[in-house]
Amino acid sequence: MKLLKNILGFFLLPYFIFILSSSQVRADFCGDSLREFYQDIDVVVNKSTLSFEDLRNFSLSYDILIAKIGKNACAQKLIEETMPIRQSMKERRIETIRGHLKRGIKTESGEDLSAEFDYLTGNLTKYNYEFALALGPDVKRVTKKIAPPKNEKCTDVIHQNEALNLTNVRNQDSVGWCYAFAAADLLSYQLKKKISAVSLYDSGQDIEKDIKSRDSENGGDIRQSIVNYIKKNNGLCLEEDLPSNDFKFCTDMQYGHFLNNFLKVIKEKRLDDELASNQCLGQNLKAAFPGLNFAQLKNYADQNGTKRIIEYLYDLQCKKMSFQNIKMNPASLTTPTHEQAALLKKLDEQISNGQVVAIGYKYHTLTGSNAEGDHASVVVGRRSNPETGACQYLVRNTWGKNCDQRESADLTCHKNCTEKGCRFSGHFWVTDERLKESLLGVTYLR
Amino acid sequence: MILTTIALFLSSSLLRASDSCQNYYVKIIFNKKEVITKEVICSHLTSDNMLFYLSKSCLKDQCDVLKQKKKPIEIPNYLANFGSPGFKLCQELGGLPQIYEFSVDQKNWESTERCLFGKNDFVEISLLSKGWKSFIKVTK
């Protein structure tokens, strides 16, 4: 009997081991397949809006999963396990299309969005949907959290034109003239032509003193910079005549450093030597002051040294004024004369009227950071946040196409997205409450 | 069935390609004239669908600035109102910031900012900011 048991055990044990291990292999195969699927969809699964391409990528990954598991015993279980994510993708695609249709966008990647919307919401059954396997009728819509009611007073709008838009944010580089850059943006939008930002320098002291060090810079007033410039010059200077930053230096990559080095050369009476030996200085001067007449520059330097030499160069560049005899009437509301609520109300009114608005604000209050100092930017849009219902404003910064701010529920960096991916635009959305608390002043053109 | 699976696998890996390099036209405005040169610029798509441009030598974190382990850094006046924080970060990391325009077809130009390290390495400043933002200690 004992011998029989041993013999049976000898033959049956491997059989049991085989059964166990093959089950384990099947479980690993299913688990691995599902894991791979989730890894593949990682890029799209957290996006709040889904493009047609996103859907295509998701659907392809799901098709691969289904093809892989085939008629495996775990197939049905896996299909059920993926249902929540497929439901979520379906809902997000529906909301994305809803947003597109609302903005008048009727097709995407050549596909009819209305038809897709009707199909996904169950109002159209006979439709050849490319992603039916992943998101077909078997993927039932779930009752989701009710979206916050839309704020009827906070309608979605973004103002842009050929001179000021979501792809051409400025970069004030190393100078502290945010007010001038904001003023230039305000004028550029109105006039549909890019106005020179540095031309609007108006810090109440000579440029040479202002750029000397970080501690010597004065700041300025947006409204005053516009009023004073037009009063003095009876026109405006274009960015193409006096570039503010959109050029390449061969050394001195920053505008402020270049100006300071140039002043040093003038002070030490080395202009001739530098121009003769250091090609870079000549190149940098030509880049910053296109068409510069060096003889005129030398003449001025010989007579005046560094005294107001940069202002002199700016005036030379802007000799041929654009928008001559222009009448511009910028208005400002500032604290403490006006309450912050009144500033926001005026800002909102201007946005509703199709205008952009320059703002002075406490940077740390607006961004929730511990940075010091006041800053100036331009508000170009407004929206009701689709997820939170909060009213938000789109702030156009002057620090290039970055997202330097810490993002939170109150602040998110704006991105321009295409089928290739998303790029920071240098703008950010901020809630109305946060904006209001930070405001020092608003300036707009009447 | 097997062929379909293979085909699906192949096409999906093509779709998922997140790094690629090509020649771009790079434009600078010099003395009111456009100067156009050609450069190899690579694109990198992150897992959160953000697209950045950098040099071939910096792809897959090969260059020193992307290889280095991030640690808290102090940047004086990082968020003060003068100067772009991205430029300050670039300098703090030992690079030179530069604004330039690039295009694949000389028709649609995009301007952006990059941080140059030596002759060959460059990384878009927005990519540096994204990675280093939470490590920056703001000081006066």
Image (cartoon, helix red, strand yellow):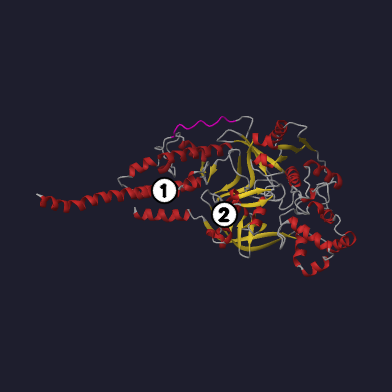
Which image quarter: residue A276?
bottom right
Q: Is residue A196 visible?
A: no
Is residue A73 shown above or below B6? above
Real-space Cα separation, disc 2 to disc 1, in angstroms: 31 Å
Q: Identify the secondary structure beneath mark 1.
A: helix
Q: Residue at x 57, y 54 (%)?
A: B70
Q: Residue at x 78, y 53 (%)?
A: A211
Kind of residue indicated by mark 1: Phe
Q: Is residue A428 visible?
A: yes
Residue identifier under label 2: B70
- Image coordinates for residue B131, horizontal then vertical, percent: 57, 52
Q: Is residue A338 left or right of residue A127?
A: right
Q: Nearer the viewer, residue A396 or B104?
A: A396
In front: mark 2 or mark 1? 2
Is residue A319 shown above or below A332? below
Q: Is residue A22 magenta?
A: no
Q: Is residue A409 left or right of residue A437?
A: left
- The residue furthest right is A303
Q: Nearer the viewer, residue A7 or A302?
A: A7
- Image coordinates for residue A61, horizontal then vertical, percent: 43, 48
- Image coordinates for residue A324, horizontal then vertical, percent: 83, 47
Q: Are marks 2 and 1 on the same chain?
A: no
Residue stretch rendered in magenta on the structure:
A141-150
Mark 2 is surrounded, within 10 Å at the Cα level, by few (under 14), some (14 to 19) or many (20 or more) other residues, namely few
> Chain letter of disc 1?
A
Kind of residue indicated by mark 2: Lys
Q: Is residue A231 left or right of residue A25?
A: right
Give the number of the disc on residue A409.
none
Mark 1 is surrounded, within 10 Å at the Cα level, by few (under 14), some (14 to 19) or many (20 or more) other residues, namely many
Residue identifier under label 1: A37
